[in-house]
Structure formats: structure tokens, C-alpha cells
């Protein structure tokens, strides 16, 4: 169980570069551990079907030279983006697998740590056709199951963006516990503690940004930077991480802002993934399609829809929650 709790904080992720589908067996060159992980992914796909999930294109192919996905985020130091959907936070994939190398590349376009908050991390899965990587095959079984369920959830549910991210976290780890026969309450509670820490820090930094108001508010730049540093240091102690930036907080806020509400919803279904999934597929609030008006308009409209979704879920919980 100790190992199970350790992987919770990882949230939050050989032959050629071509992708292959192996319909008649495993790819050559895998270790025993990697073979077992491959077979585990197949078992998760069967488990998903039992939950009423439709098949996806995720985790069907293997890229031997694709070890993981490198993601890079940055924002100006005087802003606090809501999430990685917010246009104030620039997000991109990177071919460089370390922070230092990415900082050197960003400097070429004028993005420096002196003026921007930068966050880099690697993940083992992305929805929409993610491949099986060597890194994923060498992960702990619990982490593999949670990642596959998380990404396949995205391709099965069309609820508004930030709710989708929070629900994928709950479904991924809650479904993993169901798969292995674990009690989900402790695992999801630990994640909730982390979520609340990030959410609180995001609120603190957002208030500081409003007070500074790009030099027109009631605190100076020096006061703003000092208080921001203190808030980030408090978060680092709470989540046991180093060098946390506002870009890091914004990216995690994408998953954690609605985590508490979604966790209550999951608990209302007795931690059962299947009815939770059915409920989310039946809600009248859906993810917005297309961003013809630009990222800012899409972000604003998404937040508006999410306010309606919040009220809908809250009303449901009020009438169905178990005392």
C-alpha cells in the first residue's frame, strides 16, 4: 500500500520512430517487465469495456524511440493564468527532455526566467491516439492502469474542459482501485489534499496579481514579488516539491480546481466508476467544439458553461448525497 500512495504524486504522466500495431503478439525486444505491462494494458482495455466505455485509439501502438511526452508551459510573472486553457499560459510540446535545455531554447525567442515563469514536465500519456512508450511499460502497475483509464476517459466523455480534467483524475485513480480491489477513499483523499494546496496557492497568487494590477494597484512590484515567492514556498512545503512556479500552479489548477466537487460526485456513486461515467455522459453541459473566435473567447465561453455545470452537479449532490 505504501508504494500505491507514492505514485499518486507523480500526476500529477527501440527499433524505429514509426508506430506499429501488434495484432498478433508483442513487439520484439521487450523485457519481462515490459511484456507484463503490455498484457496489463490489454486487461485494462477489457476492464474499460465492462464499465461501458467505448474503444479508443489510445495505447494500441508502440513507439520504441518515444520514451515520454515533454510538455512546456510559460507565462509572464505578473499574471496568474487559470489553467493551461487560459491564453495567458503558453503551452507546447517539446523535443528536449530537460528544463535547462528548454530554457536555452526559449531564450532564443526572448522568453527568460527573469521575465517569465516556466514549467517543464514529462507525461506518459495524452488522449487522442497516445502511443505505448518504453517509460510507460516500466512504470508501476497501478500507475499504468491509472494513466490508461485517465486518457481513455477523455475520449469517452465530453463534459466542459476543466471538469473533464478533474473527472479524469478521479476516474483514473478511482478506476485503478476498482481494477486492483483497493479501497479508493484513501488514495483519492491524498490527491484531494494536494489539490486543495494547489487551489489555495492559485487563489493567493490571483489576489496578488489583482492587487499589483500591472503597477497600477495598491502594492509595489517588489512587494508583489516577495509575497509571490512566499506563497510558492508554502506550496512547495505542502506538496513536497521544489522550484514551483506560477506556470506550474496554473497547469495543475487545470486538474485540481474542480477536483473536490467531482470527488463528491464520485462518492455519491459509492466510488463505482460505471454509474459515475454514465452520469457524466448524460449531463446537458458539453465541451465546446471549435475556437473560431480565438483562444480567449473559447476560454471565456468555457468558463461560462462550467458555471452552469457547477450548479447542475451541486443541485444533484444536494438531492442525492448520502448522510
Image (spheres, rainbow, N blue to C red):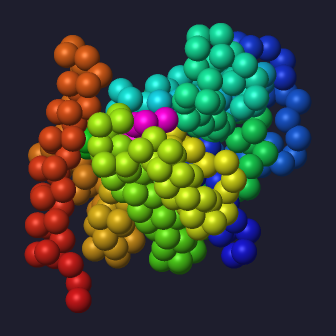
Residue 308 in the image, given as x and y percentages of width and height: 12, 50
Residue 256 in the image, given as x and y percentages of width and height: 42, 55
Q: Is residue 216 above or below residue 218?
A: above
Between 73 and 228, the one nearer to me in the picture: 228
Image side of residue 231 versus residue 168, left or right: right
**Tally of numbered tags:** 0
Q: Quadrant of the N terminus?
A: bottom right
Residue 155 visible here: no
Q: Is residue 116 above or below residue 311?
A: above
View extreme (bottom): residue: 323
| Residue located at (45% from left, 47% from top) | 224
Image side of residue 146 versus residue 289, left or right: right
| Residue located at (26% from left, 43% from top) | 159
Between 272 and 143, the one nearer to me in the picture: 143
Q: Main secondary structure of the magenta part?
A: loop
| Residue located at (18% from left, 71% from top) | 317
Between 245 and 132, the one nearer to me in the picture: 245
Image side of residue 208 versus residue 113, left or right: left
Q: Quadrant of residue 160?
A: top left
Question: Is residue 78 within the magenta segment?
Answer: yes
Q: Is residue 3 above or below residue 46?
A: below
Residue 97 in the image, given as x and y percentages of width and height: 74, 28
| Residue located at (88% from left, 41% from top) | 31
Which residues are the magenta region? 77-82
Between 51 and 215, the one nearer to me in the picture: 215
Question: Is residue 119 within the magenta segment?
Answer: no
Image side of residue 37 versus residue 109, left or right: right
Q: Quadrant of the C terminus?
A: bottom left
Residue 218 in the image, given as x and y percentages of width and height: 31, 48
Amino acid at each position: 500500500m505504501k508504494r500505491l500512495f507514492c505514485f499518486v504524486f507523480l500526476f500529477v504522466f527501440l527499433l524505429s520512430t514509426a508506430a506499429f500495431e501488434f495484432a498478433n503478439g508483442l513487439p520484439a525486444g521487450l523485457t519481462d517487465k515490459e511484456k507484463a505491462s503490455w498484457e496489463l494494458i490489454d486487461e485494462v482495455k477489457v476492464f474499460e469495456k465492462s464499465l461501458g466505455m467505448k474503444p479508443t485509439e489510445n495505447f494500441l501502438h508502440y513507439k520504441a524511440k518515444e520514451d515520454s511526452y515533454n510538455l512546456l508551459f510559460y507565462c509572464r510573472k505578473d499574471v496568474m493564468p487559470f489553467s493551461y486553457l487560459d491564453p495567458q499560459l503558453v503551452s507546447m510540446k517539446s523535443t528536449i527532455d530537460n528544463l535547462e535545455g528548454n530554457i536555452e531554447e526559449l531564450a532564443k525567442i526572448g522568453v527568460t526566467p527573469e521575465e517569465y515563469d516556466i514549467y517543464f514536465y514529462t507525461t506518459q500519456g495524452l488522449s487522442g491516439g497516445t502511443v505505448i512508450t518504453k517509460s510507460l511499460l516500466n512504470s508501476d502497475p497501478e500507475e499504468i492502469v491509472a494513466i490508461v483509464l485517465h486518457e481513455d476517459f477523455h475520449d469517452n466523455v465530453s463534459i466542459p474542459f476543466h471538469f473533464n480534467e478533474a473527472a479524469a483524475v478521479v476516474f483514473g485513480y478511482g478506476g485503478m482501485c476498482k481494477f486492483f480491489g483497493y479501497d479508493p477513499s484513501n488514495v483519492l483523499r491524498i490527491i484531494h489534499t494536494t489539490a486543495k494546496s494547489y487551489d489555495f496557492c492559485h487563489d493567493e497568487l490571483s489576489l496578488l496579481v489583482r492587487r499589483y494590477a500591472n503597477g497600477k494597484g495598491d502594492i509595489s512590484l517588489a512587494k508583489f514579488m516577495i509575497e509571490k515567492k512566499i506563497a510558492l514556498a508554502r506550496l512547495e512545503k505542502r506538496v513536497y516539491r521544489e522550484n514551483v512556479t506560477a506556470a506550474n500552479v496554473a497547469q495543475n489548477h487545470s486538474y485540481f480546481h474542480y477536483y473536490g466537487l467531482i470527488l463528491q460526485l464520485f462518492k455519491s456513486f459509492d466510488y463505482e466508476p460505471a454509474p459515475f461515467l454514465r452520469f457524466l455522459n448524460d449531463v446537458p453541459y458539453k465541451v465546446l467544439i471549435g475556437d473560431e473566435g480565438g483562444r480567449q473567447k473559447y476560454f471565456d465561453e468555457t468558463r461560462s458553461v462550467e458555471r452552469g455545470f457547477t450548479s447542475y452537479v451541486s443541485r444533484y449532490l444536494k438531492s442525492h448525497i448520502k448522510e
